[in-house]
Structures are given as C-alpha cells and as structure tokens.
Amino acid sequence: MKKEIHVQKSPLTNTIYAGHLINGGSRWGENRTDVTGEACAAVAQHVLANGEPVMVTGNGKPLYEITVRDLTK
C-alpha cells in the first residue's frame, strides 16, 4: 500500500511540514520535512496562474480568499 504524503502547519512553530503520518494520523513519521518556502511559493504561483483570487473552502463554506501581488513587475 502506497503511503500518502500529508502537508500540515505546526501550531507551535508556524512551519509547514510534508511527510507521512503514523499511528492513525496522529503523529509524523521520521521523514517529516520543512517545506514552508516551497509550499508558499507554489501557492503564490498557483494563484497568479489562476488570474484571480483563489477561494479555499471547508465543508462547502468559504474559509479563506488568497490573493497575490507579483513584486517582480
């Protein structure tokens, strides 16, 4: 069975981690990796490519609206 990669933010350090969960999803496995910079850059690129703000929903209800301003232009 293939292990799924999960992405979560640490409530203590505000760091975004990617890796595999163990113990039924309650703990990180040993290969947890800090992906904060890469994750933020990927989201910014996704929003820019979308051409308009991106709505993030949960249970069918809007939770967040993400907008990005390109500072290189």
Image: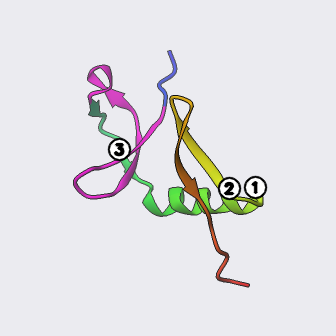
> What SS does tag 2 mark?
helix
> What SS does tag 3 mark?
loop
Q: Quadrant of residue 67?
A: bottom right
State which region is magenta.
5-26
| Residue 46: mark in rendering | 2
* Residue furthest front in the image: 61
> What SS does tag 1 mark?
helix
Please report the residue visible at 56 percent of the width from the left and 30 percent of the height from the top.
60
How was the colour assigned to the protein in this rendering? rainbow
Please report the residue visible at 65 percent of the width from the left and 52 percent of the height from the top.
54
| Residue 50: mark in rendering | 1
CA–CA distance in space, label 1 to label 2: 6 Å
- In this rendering, the count of numbered labels is 3
Give the answer, above or below, for where 34 lies relative to 41.
above
Who comes first in sequence, dot 3 or dot 2?
A: 3
| Residue 32: mark in rendering | 3
Determine crowd level at label 3: few under 14, some 14-19, many 20+ residues with C-alpha closer than 10 A. some
Q: Quadrant of residue 8?
A: top left
Q: Amino acid at mark 2?
A: His
